[in-house]
Image (tube, grey):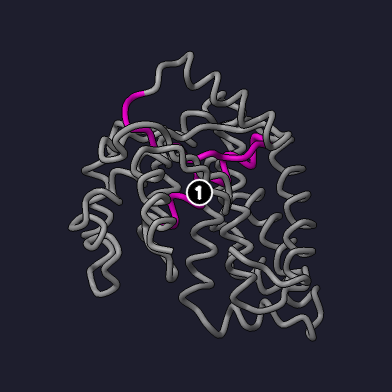
């Protein structure tokens, strides 16, 4: 998600409120908080007039707070109500960015739960691997990204793929992405979620494509090398592609390090042609 300046400030302020609320709750409570914030984001996404009213910074913040309390009071947990009130009381660049902000807060709440449970690594890895699986199955990706298809059918399809096989946090994040894509493809959304999980651990993600499986020792050496190069913690996401012929392709952010046989051959062909 890309936010304009006012929305970035609003999100940063409300995240502090979110973390303060989560700090005072048990780890398990962060999950329902995230799920209910996703539901609030979904409501505002559907109700154009409501989100415009709640994002109108020219009105009295107290009036917006009263509206939220009247609308959600008794229907969501107090923690969810507190965070939503903080969100609508802030100044956002647009109604759409208010919805984006609440969805971002929901994701943060769920990742905090995974972090407290010692499962953040697993969630990050599951999101990344699921993205690769779907990207490699064109028909599945098209079915999940079909805007004309019924949401229930897409949720049933993804649940059949992950049910009982992933962490509950992963399942909730994926269900929201599929059920409320809001212009995102499933693969793009999963990659972004995996990156958010990585950021939660204050590290960057290196997407590694290898001609063959990497041993644990090889992965440790590669991680150490990348950390020296970039001067910060690096997490690896590794996938195998035998068509590389040999070597590795490493992507960190927008930078690509191509040490594969196929990459070197292509570079040679370009040099000879030029």
Out of 76 and 241, give the one closest to the viewer: 241
Image quarter (top left, top right, bottom left or bottom right) of the C terminus: bottom left
Task: Residue 251: tell me if it is visible.
Answer: yes
Which residue is found at the position 42% from the left and 35% from the top? 248
Q: Residue furthest top?
A: 217
Which residue is found at the position 67% from the left and 34% from the top? 229
* 144 to the left or right of 209: left
Magenta span: 188-213
- Picture quarter containing residue 96? bottom right
On screen, residue 48 above or below 241:
below
Q: Which residue is mark 1?
A: 193
Image quarter (top left, top right, bottom left or bottom right) of the N terminus: bottom right
The answer to if 206 sits in the magenta stretch is yes
Out of 206 and 246, give the one closest to the viewer: 246
Out of 3 and 88, give the one closest to the viewer: 3
The answer to if 163 sits in the magenta stretch is no
Q: Residue furthest left?
A: 139
Q: Residues within 10 Å of mark 1 (few under 14, many from 20)?
A: many
Residue 22: horizontal and vertical position, in percent?
69, 40
Residue 201: horizontal and vertical position, in percent?
64, 34
- Picture quarter containing residue 153? bottom left
Residue 243: horizontal and vertical position, in percent?
26, 40
Residue 268: horizontal and vertical position, in percent?
40, 49
Task: Residue 177: tell me if it is visible.
Answer: no
């Amino acid at each position: 998600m890309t936010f304009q300046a006012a929305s970035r400030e609003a999100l940063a302020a409300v995240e502090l409120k979110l973390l303060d609320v989560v700090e005072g709750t048990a780890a398990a409570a962060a999950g329902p908080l995230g799920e209910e914030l996703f539901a609030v984001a979904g409501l505002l996404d559907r109700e154009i007039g409501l989100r415009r009213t709640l994002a109108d910074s020219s009105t009295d913040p107290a009036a917006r707070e009263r509206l939220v309390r009247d609308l959600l009071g008794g229907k969501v947990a107090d923690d969810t109500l507190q965070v939503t009130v903080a969100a609508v009381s802030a100044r956002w660049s647009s109604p759409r960015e208010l919805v984006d902000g609440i969805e971002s807060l929901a994701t943060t709440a769920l990742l905090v739960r995974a972090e407290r449970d010692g499962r953040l690594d697993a969630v990050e890895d599951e999101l990344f691997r699921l993205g690769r699986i779907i990207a490699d199955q064109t028909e599945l990706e098209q079915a999940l990204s079909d805007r004309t298809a019924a949401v229930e059918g897409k949720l049933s399809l993804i649940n059949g793929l992950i049910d009982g096989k992933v962490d509950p946090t992963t399942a909730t994040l994926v269900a929201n992405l599929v059920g409320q894509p809001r212009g995102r493809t499933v693969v793009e959304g999963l990659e972004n979620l995996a990156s958010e999980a990585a950021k939660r651990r204050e590290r960057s993600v290196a997407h590694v494509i290898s001609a063959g499986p990497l041993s644990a020792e090889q992965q440790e050496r590669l991680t150490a090398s990348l950390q020296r190069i970039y001067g910060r913690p690096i997490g690896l996401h590794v996938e195998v592609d035998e068509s590389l012929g040999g070597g590795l392709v490493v992507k960190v952010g927008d930078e690509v390090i191509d040490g594969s046989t196929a990459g070197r051959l292509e570079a040679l062909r370009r040099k000879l042609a030029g």
